[in-house]
Amino acid sequence: MYKLCISFLMMSFLAAGQSKPIPSTNKKDDDFNKKVSSLLSKMTLEEKIAELTQDAPANERLGIPMMIYSECLHGLWLDGATVYPQAIALGGTWEPELLREMTTEIAKEARAANITHCYSPNLDVISGDARYGRVEESYGEDPYLVSRMGVAFIEGLQGTEKKRFDKNHIIATAKHFVGYPENRRGINGGFSDMSDRRLYEIYMPPFEAAVKEAKVGSVMPGHQDFNGVPMHMNTPLLKGVLRDKWGFDGFIVSDNNDVLRLSSMHYIAKDKVDAAILGLKAGVDMDLVIGKSPDFSTYTSNVLQEALKRDPSIIKNIDQSVSRILTAKYKLGLFETKDKVYPDTIVSTPESQAVALKIAKKAITLLKNDGNLLPLDKNKIKSIAVIGPNAAEVRFENGKYPQLGGYAGIPPYYISVLEGIQDKVGKDIQINYAEGAPLKSESTAGFAEAIAAAEKSDVVILAVGGSTETCGEGLDRDNLDLFGAQNQLVEAIHKAGKPIVVVLINGRPLSINYIAENIPAILETWYLGMNSGEAIAETIFGDNNPGGKLTVSFPRSVGQLPVTYLERPDFVGSGKGLYKFADKSPLFPFGYGLSYTTFEYSNLKLAKQSIPADGKTTVSVDITNTGKVTGNEVIQTYVRDDFASVGRYNKMLKGFERIALNPGETKTVAFELNFDNLSIYNQEMKKVVEPGDFTISVGASSLEKDLKTIKLTVK
């Protein structure tokens, strides 16, 4: 009798509460809207509620197919899939087209496994706090760079124009909306308090680009309390900005258990019923609960039936959310392929593996190369010591490799540094391997073996850094030094007196002061995916000239945090804007990276030196390879409004391009300057271009010494 009454109650609200079709711009969308409206009118309340969770089972009565999810931050999070470099390494390529190529391959693997919805990319801008364990999931500390990488990722995964959501593409999810990394202690999920100015200047741009340019199909809010309002009930941002202002027409999926957390963590909802009401009213369409435990689920039949008794008006929110999810299924073509049989295993293809290797080689960043120690000449070396906790293959009991970074499955193979070097040199060079010290151990018991290996070798490759046990989601730290006895190991090997190349394999910037001061050559490789060792070996021996650049600043110590190139004017000129007893500058800055060749910048000029506020011009520069080998350079353009009505950052990245140059070759690179990259938010938070002078800086990094400048006047 109770179920009958509830069903009758729901039917009475259905006619009044049914959501309006999403406004369409083409015949195909109109057709989807009609199909969704027709299907919705046939669904019972139970059937509607069943759609409001991830991996909702197929509805056999109405022929509604299942939409299966996964993660694909740097490859499908499924065993057997291709594992690409982690996001922080992808950002270090400074080449968005590589991400488009990568996600095109990921989407093919996903479709082959009947996966059509992925919870990626991570569009969080890292705010300069490397204590935060999820630094590795981001493309870096700059909103423009993250925007460009994010758009490319989404377009490759989803497809564009006629290919959008076709049989070779899937739905992307932009996360974590919004301001998620902005917390005062580097803690995952910590509350975020910030001004509208900081929100719109730093954190909003990647999500706005994802919606307006890439037309992302799904968005995931962050775990956090944002200015006192948890994101999963933040109607002004989820509806007012995301949907009404930007025109987002996809569906919003919660982060894991986060609708429930409106009650269990934020203590705003008194129970899970009220939490469900708040989530639905804010526009959270899908309740993600990994494992679907009833203890953590809110969009379930018993909860939502009680919610409808408390607030009958939410039937319109239920209908609206179901409509959005059904629309996604129609757009993906799932209704036509619901009976297709899929394999039980994922197949990583040679084509995708080649893409992974290409990206890995382009992600490697050369931080130091005193005396041109690198590349090594195989003809002049008889023996190499390969030492360190990250040198050889390490595998957990579950088969996972800790040097791949978070959100990765088990690839069909993994090439370690040791294996890569062994494969590269064959029997021509003696390899002397010693671990030295386990990554997380304080023990020095293995030092003697490592020192002996170094002493009988011509050169040392020392692989140190971190792993998925020291960095990743939930692995926030209060110390950024090398974990365990690694720093002691570096010092001990250094005392052996042999040339050393440090290979960093890690997910966050580390305070490697001793290494930076004493070791002649340093390669930052981050997590390079399944082909790590091959890419590193090719770089060490010169078959690959490193061209990556840092997308996050390296701190000298935890006390320096947050450290980022995005700084506003301070007292530095008077001496008061400095630390009293320490260097304020980063150990390695944003945009920094060396090469085995050298580049010269010249002939910086503007097509027009003066433009109106609504006008545009171009800035161009010539880059010449003045060295002896082919190399890649990343040309970076920064803009500053010299005198404006509000405070600004000293400079902001507004353009970049990675180019390859042969020895002696010169190329001209040009960037357009227009409203988008000259504008600021004025005191009324209106985006405007104010008349006056602008400093346009172009060069090899964010460091002033690496930049050439020119003045632009806006009338």
Image (cartoon, rainbow, N blue to C red):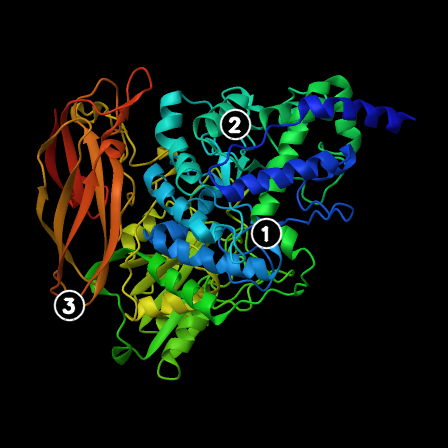
Tell me the amino acid under the disc marked 3: Lys
**Residue 126 locus on image (x, y percent):** 41, 38
Q: Could you say whether the residue bearing mark 3 is in a helix, strand or loop?
A: loop
Q: Residues within 10 Å of mark 2 (few under 14, many from 20)?
A: many
Q: Could you say whether the residue bearing mark 2 is in a helix, strand or loop?
A: helix
Viewer-side label of 1, 2? 1
Q: Is residue 345 visible?
A: yes
Residue at position x 8%, y 34% from top? 609
**Residue 598 locus on image (x, y percent):** 16, 59
CA distance separating discs 3 and 2? 53 Å
CA distance separating discs 1 and 2? 27 Å
Residue at position x 58%, y 63% from top? 395
Quarter-wise, where is residue 525 in the image?
bottom left
Viewer-side label of 1, 3? 1
Tell me the amino acid under the disc marked 2: Leu
Earlier along the polypeptide chain: callout 3 or callout 2? Answer: 2
Q: Could you say whether the residue bearing mark 1 is in a helix, strand or loop?
A: loop
Q: Nearer the viewer, residue 650 or 352?
A: 352
**Residue 147 locus on image (x, y percent):** 37, 41
- The residue indicated by pointer 2 is 238
Q: Residues within 10 Å of mark 1 (few under 14, many from 20)?
A: some
Residue at position x 52%, y 27% from top? 238
Tell me the amino acid under the disc marked 1: Gly
- The residue indicated by pointer 3 is 628
- The residue indicated by pointer 1 is 333
Q: Are marks 1 and 3 in contact (CB under 8 Å)?
A: no
Viewer-side label of 3, 2? 2
